[in-house]
Image (cartoon, rainbow, N blue to C red):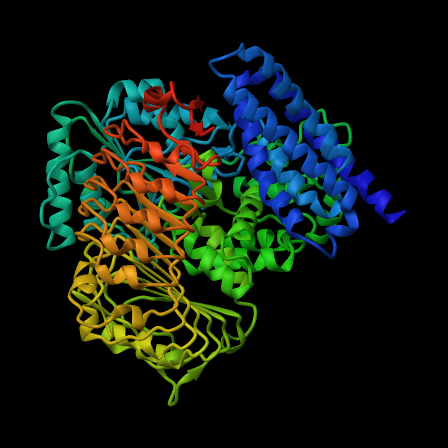
Amino acid sequence: MEEILGKVLVGKAVEESTKPVVDEVKKALGFGEILKRVKSILELMRPIVDSIKQSSSGELDRQKEENEKLIQRFEEGETLIRKHSRAHYLVNNWIYAGKITAFYDSLRLFYKYHIPLKQSKNIMEILALLEPQSKSGNGGASGSGSGSGSGSGRIGFLGSEGKGQSGGCSAPDPPKFMVGLDMMRKLKKLVVEGDATVVVVTAPGGCGKTAIVLKLCQDPDVKGKFKDNILYITVSKVPNIKLMARKLFEHKNWSVPEFETDEDAINELKQLLENLAQKAPVLLVLDDVWGGLDSVESTFPLHKFAEFKIPNCRILVTSRYGFPKIGSTYKLDLLDAKQAKELLLHSALLTDEDKDLDDDVVDKIVKRCSRFPLALKVVGGLLRGLPVDIWKSQLLEWSEGHSILDSEEDLLDCLQSSLASMKAKLKDCFMDLGSFPDDKKIPIIALIDMWAELYKLDDNGVHAISNLHKLSLQNLLHLVVTRRDPMDQDESYYDDNAFVLQHDILRDLAIRQSSQEPMEERKRLFLDLTGNKLPDWWSQQNQPFIIKARLLSISTDEMFCSSSWCNIEAPEVEVLIINFQTKEKHYTLPEFMKQMVKLKVLVVTNYGFSIPELANFSVLGSLPSLKRIMLERVSIPTICNTIVVLKNLEKMTLVMCKINKAFFDSAIKIPEMLPNLREINLDSCNDLVGLPEWLCDLGQLRKLSISNCHKPSELPEGIGKLENLQLLRLHACTKLLELPETIGSLQKLSFLDVSGCSRLKKLPEQMGNLCNLRKLYIRRCLRLTELPTSSMDRNKQLKIICDPEMARHWEDHYDVTHSRNETTLTWL
């Protein structure tokens, strides 16, 4: 009886939450959009199907009938997509268009009747993909939505989506759904017609300041006046003015001057703006400026910018603080009751016409959230897809009639109570996000490594990605994948183009959730250090302070002296994250790391302007359990000077690091130092001139990924000795001329990516020996017009993904199919 009742409740929730989505989709989507959504849904179903197929006992087996129907539905969709793809140039497209559209409509009935109760969260993830718009952003003056998207979208009032993204200093796209846009009219007049050099948009954190400014940047009148001179930069709580100036110079393709001080950077920036303003008006957006007149926070020198007084130059600022003596101030109003309700319902995937909707409950929740956009957004996401009875129960748990606008602490109280129903492991993942600094990209590859060791999730990141999707659907983060290949979803998260963004208030929430116990008892400990001012509990101890945390995150600013670490004993730490900035040429790893005998994951990220060398690198040799290292924007010292044997290290990721000296200046047999290394990821290591021969002696290596390294022209001949290699990615290695014939010896290789290797003219004939090769990516290889004929008859399962233009070279010999996003050649 319980099982039947559970299915009825889930079916009803799915039916009601799907109804407005499907109705709207039928009105708004053409077949092209429906096709994209079906592919996305199938990709979301794929890990579930794979998990079911791999399971031989336990919970999934007890629901064998439902699982078989899920697999059947998945395979039906895969077959339809494959047939449509093959029929692209051979039969009328409309034949399969009707079938795929019918399959799309049938998904609602399928999820209503055939998915077990325990998979209800997966239902909500898939339903989210049935929406007529990609929910890469929400909020506005208030907006709503979530989900993975293509980089430029953001959740408007959450204030972190878009920050730290690649793509120069262009303003990110505004949220796709927004309410309260009438607030923009007065602001637009101040920006377009006003006389003030500086216009400050002010409101508490999470009210939608950033979202409304992004919307303004897309306004036709604003774009008409400022044209290509709309510049966007995030300032944040700890501003790095020299780095900001550098980004603006690089964005406009100007040579970057040398900045000795912040004053130098500001003066050079003034000259840049003056030069730009001579050709067209300039709008400089300074987002998230901290520190007003009465603030104890470190202040950003906004008054220096106000003194520019450059004709045809406007500076638009968003801030929680008021600057009454600087320019014009626009105070962002709260939403009215109708707008607040609309935002809550949209965040929960409901409409006013929903027949089970209790207006009284909704109105009380709106009142409880005091029409505050961030609270409405998060609460709506957390209640998404749940029965109205649960809404009522949650409402009773909150204190009656209390406003959350009295302080930011009250807002955190409200959001904290909203997390009460979250499952423990998912909640742990959310709290771990507090390990990274405000307004910075959080690499998904780092989260995969952390969670694989802390929570025993799979090494390939399937469960980690699933958790990120769940948190995104609850509007607790924004998942961004800027380079996404539908044919290769599992590998799309393994580079610098896949990351997480989070509003600073939600980061504060994660830290608060993690700080309920006394310092020495916490499971995770976050330390933000300013200068050499250490916490009293740390610096005033007569003996080392002992903590029990499994995760330790330390963030230091550029005034911190890394050679004067205090001692700390952390024998239980399994994950250590060090975030730093420095003006020095070296950054010293703390000596107390030697005592971390359980440390399995080390993540070190430099957010500063220059790239310092890591000092005390030999401390890593004292870590017997270390399995995964991720280093970003640091210089690796010469290995022969720092003998480090890492016998248990399995994975090494280096992003934008200087590594050539370490790789080639060593006389030591490095394979003996790294006997169990299974995966190497090198991304944007611009000083790397080639791959060392010793790399070919890493007998346990399974994955080798080299992306955006523009100097190597060849691979070592010895690469054929990597008998266990399964994945080889050489993405955007623009000077790579050829692959060695010895690559044909890689009998276990199943994935090869040479996309973006623009000088590559041919592939080795010996590739025909790669009997296990299943995917070959050759996009943007414009000089590669021939394929080795030896491969044609030997590998019936190989799929080649290339550009549509290049596919024409092989249409006479291969079954060529392609869509706008991918081209697949199935070798018959």
**From the viewer's perspective, is residue 231 above or below residue 471?**
above
- For the question of whether residue 179 can be seen, the reply is no
362 displayed left or right of 440: right
Please state the horizontal and vertical placement of residue 429, each as a whole percent of the image: 54, 57
* Residue visible at 54% across and 54% down in the picture: 412
Closest to the observer, 507 or 460? 460
Left or right: 359 in relation to 624: right
Residue 794 pos. (x, y %): 43, 37
Q: Is residue 89 left or right of residue 264?
A: right
Which residue is situated farthest in the bottom direction here?
Answer: 542
Residue 96 drawn above or below residue 58? above
In the image, 504 versus 815, the foreground residue is: 815
Residue drawn at the location 69% of the way across and 40% of the way down: 364
Task: State the image coordinates of residue 202 (x, y, percent, origin top left).
Answer: 39, 40
Q: Is residue 378 above or below residue 33?
A: below
* Of the pair 739 and 251, the residue shown nearer to us: 739
Which residue lies at the image location 45% right of the left edge and 22% below the top edge? 817
| Relative horizontal placement of residue 120, taking residue 621 as reference (left or right) | right
Asked if residue 61 can be seen in this view, the reply is: yes
At a point 17% along the width and 53% down the height, the residue shown is: 687
Residue at far right of view? 1
Q: Quadrant of residue 6?
A: top right
Splitting the image into 4 quarters, where does residue 666 fall? bottom left
Q: Residue 737 appears at what percent x and percent y?
A: 20, 40
